[in-house]
Amino acid sequence: MYHDLDEPVDVIAIFAKGNLTPLRFQWKGQTYKVTRVTGRWKAPKGDTWVRHFSVVDAQDNVFQLVYDERRTDWSICKVWVE
């Protein structure tokens, strides 16, 4: 089932070789380990940029995480769960 959201999340990520990669995130009191990043892209938001990441967890749930470069914070904007 697909859900649109706009909720803050805490993310542990690594920045290496010019790439920002989320490793795990906490949402609604639960920690999700990212097993795959299936997509990444940047999009303009006003006068700044946001980075989008499509990620998959161990249960094959798909999440879209967003990193706001200006505010330096993360949110979850889409979820696909079985």
Image (tube, rainbow, N blue to C red):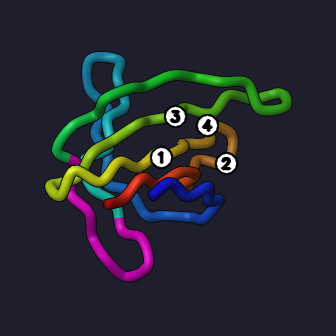
Residue where numbered disc 1 is placed: 65
Whole-angstrom CA distance, mark 4 to mark 1, is 13 Å
Amino acid on which the number 2 mark rests in the picture: Arg
Q: Which residues are magenta?
A: 26-34
Toward the top, the furthest residue is 17
Mark 3–mark 1 contact, CB under 8 Å? yes
Which residue, given by chain and number where applicable, does mark 2 sit on?
71
Query: Percent position (x, y) of residue 61?
Result: 29, 54
Q: Is residue 29 left or right of residue 36?
A: right
Query: Which class describes the residues within 10 Å of circle 3: few (<14), some (14-19), or many (20+)?
Result: many
What residue would you read off at disc 4?
A: 69
Query: Where is the C terminus found, in terms of image quarters?
Result: bottom left
Residue at left offset 57%, top offset 64%:
8
Along the polypeptide, which appears first: circle 1 or circle 2? 1
Is 27 a magenta residue?
A: yes
- Identify residue for label 3: 52
Mark positioned earlier in the residue sequence (4 or 3): 3
Residue nearer the viewer, 66 or 20: 66
Crowding at dot 2, Cα within 10 Å, few <14 / some 14-19 / many 20+, comes out as few
Residues marked 4 and 3 touching at CB (< 8 Å): no
Distance between the alpha carbons at the discs numbered 2 and 4: 6 Å
Q: Position of residue 9 (x, y in %)?
A: 48, 64
Which element type, helix, strand or loop, lies under badge 3?
strand
Identify the residue at image location x=60%, y=65%. Answer: 7
